[in-house]
Amino acid sequence: MRIMYKVKNLAKGLKLPLYFTSFAPVMIAWFYMRFSDPFIFVMLVIVVVSMQAALNLAMDFTDHENGRRLRNEDTLFPIGSYLIESMGVKEKSVKAFFLLSLLISLVAGISIVVITGKYVLLLFGVLAVIISLMYALPPFRLNSRGIGEVSTFFSFGPLSFLGSIVALSGSLNLQLVLISILLGLLASAIRYLHHLPEDLSYGNRVRYFRPAYTVILIGGFIINADYPYTFLFLLPPLAISIAHLLTLKKNVLHISRQTNVIVAIQIITSLLLAIRFIL
């Protein structure tokens, strides 16, 4: 029981359930490319997972520095610096592992560019790093300015998915762009719902949460309706999304406790898209 408790605590502290959000675009791209170049696939996974770790650690550090209260700590998706405040990890250690994770991501990304010779990937990589760091670090801190979803959308949608396609020697087309938008919007929906309690109770983000969240969550599915075969695979998560919207709680803290639902929707969508591309 003690081991399970430690594993659960570690999962919370590192935000492990959210890592699939960064892994999914690379996975779907690899399935789309019919498992071509396993080595580059592994390198891409290292890039996105390391960057996700760096982002999570940066958020933990800045949340603690800014005195943000730890909430929903009894769930797998706590809000605030669970790693520091609940697990007692030192701030210096969090900062050191942030820098290490960022370095690993940068080295792996540069290695992919050198190995593939596709220097256009530098554009994808530079933008991804800048946008990711702008999310949590000063002076930008998009996550605390009510526009964190912009960074989330590009980091876990178009940049990671389309960049992975290019790295695996694929060609871009409209359908892939639309799928990248879907992935980005799902990641943004996770971010919006999960961090809602951090927004001002009288602010527009809380007041207009339901209509805005509905557009973000459903919009990505709808724009893919012009591709019937692909859309067929999107119908189950679309149905779950509609049910999720109809059963949203009223209290912002209770809404945030439904993060597990939107994360499940993102996982189901990603797996079905991966299956679609190998059939």
Image (cartoon, grey):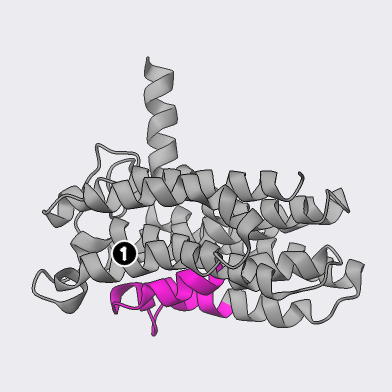
Is 155 left, or right, of 216 in this rendering? Answer: right
Q: Quadrant of residue 174?
A: bottom right
Q: Is residue 182 magenta?
A: no
Q: Quadrant of residue 228?
A: bottom right
Q: Pick the residue in front: 203 or 143.
A: 203
Q: Is residue 16 above or below residue 234?
A: above
Q: Pick the residue in front: 47 or 279.
A: 279
Q: Quadrant of residue 105?
A: bottom right
Q: Is residue 96 above or below residue 159?
A: above
Query: To which residue does mark 1 refer?
Result: 214
Q: Position of residue 163 (x, y in %)?
A: 71, 70
Q: Position of residue 122 (x, y in %)?
A: 75, 80
Question: Magenta part of the protein: which range?
Answer: 130-155
Amino acid found under the numbered disc labelled 1: Thr
Judged from the image, the secondary structure of the residue bearing numbered disc 1 is helix
Q: Pick the residue in front: 205 or 241.
A: 241
Q: Residues within 10 Å of mark 1 (few under 14, many from 20)?
A: some
